[in-house]
Image (tube, rainbow, N blue to C red):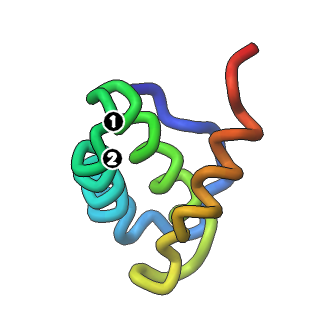
């Protein structure tokens, strides 16, 4: 899954965020490709903020991020 282009501030915790969103997506019944995109979005948002756990986005933020980038 290609990464989303963002301006990173702090990449600490990006992998943990990615994995967490990936597993959450699978748990919600998403096909693997959709869960990977969901994970990439969560990690993309997280790296734009300083910190680790505090920088992890909420579900609503990820949904907005993905909606803004939907392919036409």
- Residue 52: percent from left, percent from top: 41, 80
Give the answer, above or below, for where 49 lies relative to 19: below
At horizontal 76% and vertical 39% (from top left) the residue drawn is 68
- Asked if 29 appears above or below 7 in the picture, the reply is above
Quadrant where the N terminus sits is top left
Q: Position of residue 43 (x, y in %)?
A: 46, 55
Spatial CA span between label 2 and label 1: 5 Å
User: Which residue bears the numbered disc 2?
Assistant: 25
Q: How busy is the neighbourhood of tag 2: few (under 14 within 10 Å), some, or many (20 plus)?
A: many
Which of disc 1 and disc 2 is earlier in sequence?
2
The x, y position of residue 60, in whole percent, is: 62, 63
Residue under numbered circle 1: 30
Which residue is found at the position 67% from the left and 48% from the top? 65
Where does the image place residue 8, in percent across and percent down from the top left? Answer: 60, 58
Kind of element beneath mark 1: loop
Q: Relative to residue 22, is residue 45 depicted above or below? A: below
Task: Identify the residue at horizontal 46%, vertical 27% (top origin).
Answer: 2
Q: In front here: 43 or 27?
A: 27
Q: Identify the residue at the far top of this view.
A: 72
Secondary structure, mark 2, is helix
Q: Quadrant of residue 72?
A: top right
């Amino acid at each position: 899954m290609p990464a989303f282009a963002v301006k990173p501030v702090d990449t600490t915790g990006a992998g943990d965020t990615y994995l967490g969103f990936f597993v959450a997506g699978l748990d919600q019944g998403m096909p693997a490709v959709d869960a990977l995109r969901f994970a990439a979005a969560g990690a993309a948002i997280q790296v734009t903020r300083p910190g680790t756990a505090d920088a992890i986005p909420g579900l609503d933020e990820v949904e907005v991020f993905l909606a803004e980038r939907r392919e036409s």
